[in-house]
Image (cartoon, rainbow, N blue to C red):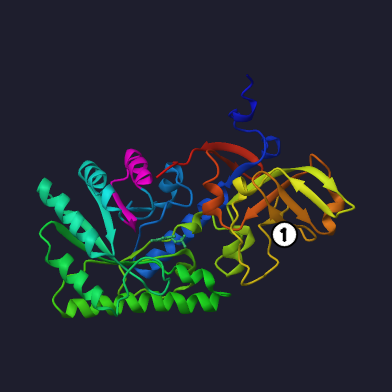
Amino acid sequence: MSLWFNRCYPFGVLFDELSTPCALVDLDRLESNAKRMAEKAMRLGVRLRPHVKTHKCIEAARIQTDLHFGGLTVSTLAEAQAFAAGGFSDITYAVPIAPQKIADAADLHAEIGTLNLLVDHPDTVRAIEVLASSRSITLPVYLEIDCGGGRSGVDPASDLAQVLVRRLADSESIDFRGLLTHAGHAYSARSRSEVYEVACEERNLITAFAAEVRDLGVEIPDVSVGSTPTLRAIDDLTGVTEARPGNYLFYDFFQTAIGSCDLDDVAFSVLATVISVDTEQGRAIIDAGALALSKDPGPTHVDPECGFGLPVTLEDQHRLPGLRLAGLTQEHGTLTGPGVEALHPGTRLRFLPNHSCLSAACFDRYNVVRDTEVVDEWHPVRGW
Ligand SMILES: Cc1ncc(COP(=O)(O)O)c(C=O)c1O
């Protein structure tokens, strides 16, 4: 059986020759995104512990950690294991750990040096203590604070927050590393100035809580914040020790809509081919559906008509007016708008996904390009 669809391309081919749908990573843009964030973290006086869940690739993490201490943030144990195997030895698993995974996490911590865990519930603290004391070890743990995102984390104004801080600080099996928060609600902002307000809230809430518990005599070594929008917007991180942005390496259409970056900064895109055109109905179909672009609805709070990804020009990634990616099913994308008239089966189109983290996770290979030439191929980690 022919394996043409799974073939590796010789480097040097033009990306237009690739089989579609496929993922393109623009190396020039990625490198400049990495440098800009690394320099900003230095200016702000915090160490950068970038989140790698966006790309899940060793090669990208090496670029991302340049100028900093080499620490990473991950969102799955599979990522932690793969990046540890790739030589990274200081990793924060920034999702509250499931009690069933603590033994595997402890194995990895022993193997690499540092795997920080995250908790927001007394039952998880207890489960960590039981495992750690059964092995006569201590495990490094952060308390997650909810700074307004309403996902995981404890409300810093709650009694539970006080109880957990005390519990973590007093535990003989836990090395209490400090406080960690993520301002996920920055994605509800409509502009850079609204993001700035969320960024100040993220910083103010966590630093105020750190000061409060230090006044009670509890040591808080680390105060860790981070999201791409808030890190782009903030200009002062006094009281914070560490930042964990992740999406900024790729960016996406969503980030352009809330003012985190320009279209020119987006380093991840999806190449697709037109496979059907119906000019009477005013629609064309591409071979990239939800399993290539993800079904993230995008920045509908900024533009209700934003569609499922932004069609851009093939070579210089400029907005293609007159085309809207109006719908997605598993392997089909539906384009509407007057620009459909100019399309034919075989026409190549490039799209900036609404959410690059979700779109990138659809692919087992990224074609790394400089301008229009494929120069490398990266393979992201899969699974949990
Ligand atoms: C705990 C945590 N830290 C950091 C990040 C990175 O944020 P962003 O994707 O906005 O860069 C995330 C993203 O979801 C996260 O969940």
Q: Quadrant of ligand 1?
A: bottom left
Q: Residue at x 46, y 76 (%)?
A: 198
Disc 1 is placed on an element classified as loop
Residue 300 in magenta stretch: no
- Whether 211 is drawn above or below 278: the answer is below
Q: What is the three-letter code of the residue carrying label 1?
A: Arg
Percent x, y of residue 215: 17, 80
Which residue lies under the disc numbered 1? 319
Specify the farthest residue to the right: 280
Q: Is residue 314 visible?
A: no
Q: Is residue 17 visible?
A: yes
Q: Is mark 1 within 8 Å of ligand 1?
A: no
Task: Say which quarter of the image contains residue 49.
Answer: bottom left
Task: Say which quarter of the image contains residue 85.
Answer: top left
- Whether 254 is drawn above or below 10: the answer is below
Percent x, y of residue 199: 44, 74
Percent x, y of residue 303: 67, 70
Instruction: Report the span colored magenta.
Output: 77-96
Sort mark 1 into few (<14), some (14-19) or many (20+) by Cα contacts within 10 Å. Answer: some
Percent x, y of residue 52: 42, 51
Q: Quadrant of the C terminus?
A: top left
Q: Residue at x 60, y 42 (%)?
A: 369
Q: Quadrant of the N terminus?
A: top right
Q: Residue at x 20, y 44 (%)?
A: 110
